[in-house]
Image (cartoon, rainbow, N blue to C red):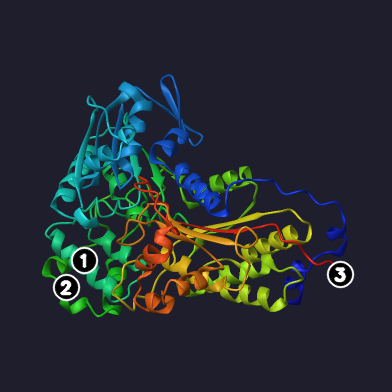
Amino acid sequence: MARVLSLFRPQPFLALVGRRKPTFCKMSMDSRAREVFAAAVEAVQPDTVVRQSIERKEDSVIISGQKYTLKHNLHMVGFGKAVLGMASEAERIMGDHLVKGVISVPHGIQQILQQHGKDHLLLKENSRIKVMEGAKHNLPDSDAQKAAEGIKQLASELTEKDLLLVLISGGGSALLPAPIPPISLQEKLDVTRRLAAAGATIQELNTVRRALSFLKGGGLAHYAHPAQVVALILSDVIGDPLDLIASGPTVRTEVWPEEVLSVLEQYKLLNSLPASVKDVLGRPSPRWKKNKDETDKAENVFNVVIGSNSVALKCAGRRARELGFRPVVMSPGVCGDVRSVSRLYGLLARFACSREEPPPEIAAEVLRLGPEVGVESWDLCRTMQVLGEGRTEGWGATCLLAGGEPTVELTGKGRGGRNQELALRVGLELRGLQLPPNGPVFLSGGTDGQDGPTEAAGAITDGGLYEEATAQGLDINNFLTNNDSYTFFSHLSAGKHLLVPGLTCTNVMDVHMLLIPAIPINIR
């Protein structure tokens, strides 16, 4: 531990050499935080990520270094909340080489985009893509099932001369329900709901989903064989695991009934399964017979993540630099309980804002929290080293960026979401530090623009939150106990701390931001 902590001790000579003057910016810390968040969201717009990933050269297209010939042989399918905008841009680029397409998108999305003036994300009137809306309230339904059947039929009709472009984004799993007969959609939904309620992990849920579905776990790629398959993926899952995003319809995954039965038995659901589910799980593996020339290597399938939390953080860092901050990206995989996550950010703020060498206990506790919040020790050490150097060498203001998807333990019935609750808890952690512009500012926002069942994406806080709330008669602890962070921020100073970007048309989880001003230090 001593060797690790030594990274963060300021080097005396560095503090004595010439210091760079911090970039001057007239904008407030609050305004700059909002600007950086907006840049993160803009970077992962559905049309933007498609445009940046596809390079059209006459009658060929290059996608992430792979070249494909276009001979009026392109077909398109897609499923997810952001897929309409992705499909619109892909069709514009591919032109008349697109033969036809089918996409499964959320119920009412076309009308919502029109109402918000997002016409550039809509298909043109003469589009060759069929739009099918479904999955009301983000749950698989009969409309989504019809769309999945249309997608399966299109894929099944392709030949070795065809190219299938698959567009995938968050929400894709609910928009591609294809239960294996005789299982009904409701029966499949009931099984997965009961598993989730029993505490099954996302990996366990996907193991069961794949076993009961035609298209998940590589099923779509199987039905498209022998066509070339290229999947462009906008990831809303930590670590961007291809087999988990929308349950991996283009990622071949073997399903063994024994493994599925083991999961169901573990959560004591084996004896209460519908007869149809028992029938399907009683069949020999795998779910479908392998095509004659189909190999496990799936050489004709190319999956590429074109948008993710990492992409959003990178562009946020670029905007932060333009606004006078030195950016440092800690991790795109922050998870765990918001109480642990808020403690981590509070400690990092105190470490960075210390006018003297911070006590070693701060770094020790930061490293202890790492495993709880999904951040590697190396990333924490690197982050603290940058924060320490920024303080001792007088680099000026710093913007610490991270992302992910923390969790909230529900103890009440209030309105809010993980971002607003995290911002509220971090505000408490910052208590006692100076106020902006001489003290830190924290922002937490969901890139989908909606944090829980509220109109806000998140909130912005600083070290004056507790006193500000107390002066206005707001008891923070009562709001936290009731998970009522949205109501709290709505009442606090007429809602000025809320982050309300409106419809963002994308989702790559959350963005966390800690703005650290230039700290004058005491040199000994």
For the residue marked with disc 1, what is the amino acid? Leu
Taking depth in this image into account, of 184 and 477 the one nearest to the observer is 477
Give the labeled residue for mark 1: 281
Give the CA separation, mark 2 to mark 3.
71 Å
- Residue 26 x/y as whole percent: 62, 46
**Callout 3: SS:** loop
Q: In the rendered structure, are the residues bearing label 2 and label 1 in contact, judged by CB atoms less than 8 Å apart?
A: yes
Which callout, 1 or 3, points to the residue nearer the camera? 3
**Residue 285 appearing in the image:** no
Check disc 3: other Cα within 10 Å, few if <14, some if 14-19, many if 20+: few
Instruction: Tell me: residue 99, above or below residue 196.
Output: above
Task: From the top left corner, tell me how far across and down residue 413 is, in percent.
Answer: 28, 74
Q: What distance separates the C-alpha of mark 1 from that of mark 3?
A: 71 Å
- The residue drawn where x is 37% and y is 46% is 504
Quarter of the rendering occupied by the N terminus: bottom right
Q: Amino acid at mark 2?
A: Leu
Q: Describe residue 464's horizontal placement relative to residue 521 as left or right.
A: left
- Residue wearing tag 2: 273
Q: Which residue is mark 3?
A: 524
Q: Is residue 514 left or right of residue 56?
A: right
- The residue type indicated by label 3 comes to Arg
